[in-house]
Image (spheres, grey):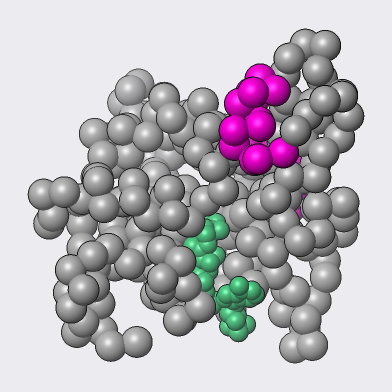
Amino acid sequence: MNTDRFIIVSPGDLENYLDLASNIAEASWPEFMLHDPIANENWHELFDRFGDYQFAIFDTEANRMAAMGNSIPFHWDNEVADLPEGGWDWVFLKAVEDNKKGISPNIQSAIQVAIHPDYQNQGFSSRMVHTMRSIGESKGFKNLVAPVRPNQKKEYPLISIDDYITWPNDDGLPFDAWLRVHARLGAKIIKPCHQAMTIRGTCADWESWTGLKFLQSGRYVIPGALNPMDMAVENNEGVYIEPNVWMVHTL
Ligand SMILES: CC(C)(COP(=O)(O)OP(=O)(O)OC[C@H]1O[C@@H](n2cnc3c(N)ncnc32)[C@H](O)[C@@H]1OP(=O)(O)O)[C@@H](O)C(=O)NCCC(=O)NCCS
């Protein structure tokens, strides 16, 4: 990667930062992932309260954003092993509530690394995690935790997350590419968080998000989802509960 061409920027560096960032989210996530209510109601808090923890890689030649990174600080006096099942949704709300109550943070959590598909598979992801770690270090935190979304689990939606995260590759590192990026940078797997994100929608919502038809109740394998989605046609509601994996980086 040419580091002169690709520079790290902060929200204050670009007037249209939020627009550029939302283009990356739309391009890199399956549609249903853009309908987590906790994310949608609270996303602005990242920039209103935690601007120092947001960053992006900007391609100065193409004049566009290649990747974005989001993290948040929160307060946690217990062991990292005690982090809850609620994962991503939980930590986002915890950080916002701590900040509203004036509680000083003592730990950082990753919220997202998203690389625009045009820039994926070019080694950007470790630079993103490095940058996130340096932010935590500059704040004096000892740990960066992350409710990590294993990016290849979508190919194995019927395998439990507990089993999936034990799969090794030939080098003894995690089989999953995104877990492996964290592991190579020294992070350790803590445990799965089975209810990291909960996404609900009507039959019509899910049909528009996925292009599938839901003519009877049951469990459905959804493209891009890490677990099946449960559709109850009689209630006109489909619920997807996403499992992630808590990992910890020692800073
Ligand atoms: C997950 C993501 C951050 C990885 O970034 P990337 O730029 O694609 O990956 P990199 O080029 O840095 O490579 C990282 C590792 O992933 C592997 N990899 C990259 N693309 C892959 C693919 N499509 N399938 C399998 N492995 C892949 C690379 O080989 C590398 O592993 P290795 O170092 O052991 O060889 C990126 O694909 C992405 O933004 N995806 C959409 C959003 C997302 O899932 N974010 C993560 C959860 S917050």
Name the one closer to the observer, 158 or 126. 158
Number of callouts:
0
The magenta-colored residue range is 190-212
The residue shown at (43%, 48%) is: 26
Q: Is residue 95 above or below residue 80?
A: above
Name the outermost residue toward the top. 235
- Residue 102: where, in percent of width, then height? 31, 26
Where in the figure is residue 150, as x and y percent of width and height? 66, 59
Q: Is residue 193 magenta?
A: yes
Q: Residue at x 70, y 50 (%)?
A: 223
Expressed as whole percent of the image width and height from the top left, the position of residue 24 reads 38, 55
Q: Quadrant of the N terminus?
A: bottom left
Residue 133 shows up from this direction: no
Residue at left 53%, top 32%?
A: 35
Decide if residue 230 is on the left or right side of residue 17. Answer: right
Task: Work out whether residue 218 or residue 188 is closer to the camera in this orientation and state it.
Answer: 218
Which quadrant of the view contains residue 63? bottom left
Q: Where does the C terminus fall, quadrant-wise?
A: bottom left
Q: Quadrant of ligand 1?
A: bottom right
79 relative position to 215: left or right: left
Residue 4, image x, y percentages? 19, 84
Quadrant in the picture for residue 149: bottom right
Whether residue 206 is visible here, answered yes or no, is yes
In this picture, residue 98 sits left or right of residue 177: left
- Asked if residue 199 is positioned above or below residue 133 in the image, the reply reads above
Relative depth, front residue between 216 and 109:
216
Give the residue at x 39% y 29%.
42
- Residue 84 painted magenta: no
